[in-house]
């Protein structure tokens, strides 16, 4: 994953700027003096959806970088499952395990 992040940071500026969003911090955020001149942020909404990751990768790389897509999608899916498991454990600790599934119908990760 770290090698892929390095490749992402090395993408030319004009391609990074294509990852735009009207929502704050959901697109590319370039270096700024208020945070750090070394900071960059890449908003990638709904990363557990392979098509979302693929659209992002096609903005950054002409070939769509399949290895990036597979790795990010797998990691995001695993993180989403871990998040759900943690929430289930919290609900169960309060004796609310039976209501968990009905609440998860509306579950949506940040994106």
Image (cartoon, rainbow, N blue to C red):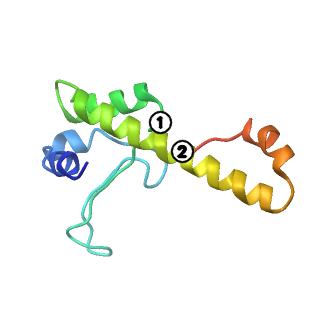
Q: Is residue 6 left or right of residue 94?
A: left
How many residues crowd mark 1 within 10 Å: few (<14), some (14–19), many (20+)?
many
Q: CA distance from mark 1 to mark 2?
A: 7 Å
- Measured as percent of width and height from the top left, residue 12 is found at 13, 44
Circles 1 and 2: CB atoms closer than 8 Å: yes
Helix, strand or loop at label 1? It is loop
In front: 32, or 54?
A: 54
- Measured as percent of width and height from the top left, residue 73 is found at 39, 35
Q: Which mark is residue 80?
A: 2
Residue matched to label 1: 48
Which of the 4 image quarters holds residue 95?
A: bottom right
In front: 38, or 84?
A: 84
Q: Is residue 5 left or right of residue 20?
A: left
Residue 77 appears in the picture as rendered? yes
- Measured as percent of width and height from the top left, residue 104 is found at 73, 40
- Measured as percent of width and height from the top left, residue 11 is found at 15, 44
Sequence order check: which comes first, mark 1 or mark 2? Answer: 1
Q: Is residue 74 left or right of residue 32?
A: right
Q: Is residue 28 left or right of residue 102?
A: left
In front: 106, or 88?
A: 88
Residue 45 appears in the picture as rendered? no
Helix, strand or loop at label 2? It is helix
Residue at image x 32%, y 40%?
19
Residue at image x 62%, y 41%?
108
Residue at image x 26%, y 44%?
17
How many residues crowd mark 2 within 10 Å: few (<14), some (14–19), many (20+)?
some
Residue at image x 21%, y 30%?
65
Which of the 4 image quarters holds residue 67?
A: top left
Which of the 4 image quarters holds residue 59?
A: top left
Q: Which mark is residue 11?
A: none
Number of numbered tags placed on the structure image: 2
């Amino acid at each position: 994953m770290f090698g892929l992040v390095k490749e992402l940071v090395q993408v030319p500026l004009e391609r990074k700027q294509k990852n735009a969003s009207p929502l704050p911090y959901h697109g590319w955020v370039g270096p700024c003096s208020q945070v750090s001149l070394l900071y960059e942020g890449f908003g990638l909404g709904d990363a557990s959806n392979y098509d979302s990751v693929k659209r992002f990768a096609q903005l950054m790389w002409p070939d769509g970088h399949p290895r990036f897509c597979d790795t990010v999608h797998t990691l995001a899916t695993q993180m989403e499952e871990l998040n759900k498991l943690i929430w289930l454990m919290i609900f169960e600790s309060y004796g609310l395990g039976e209501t968990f599934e009905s609440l998860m119908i509306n579950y949506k990760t940040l994106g």
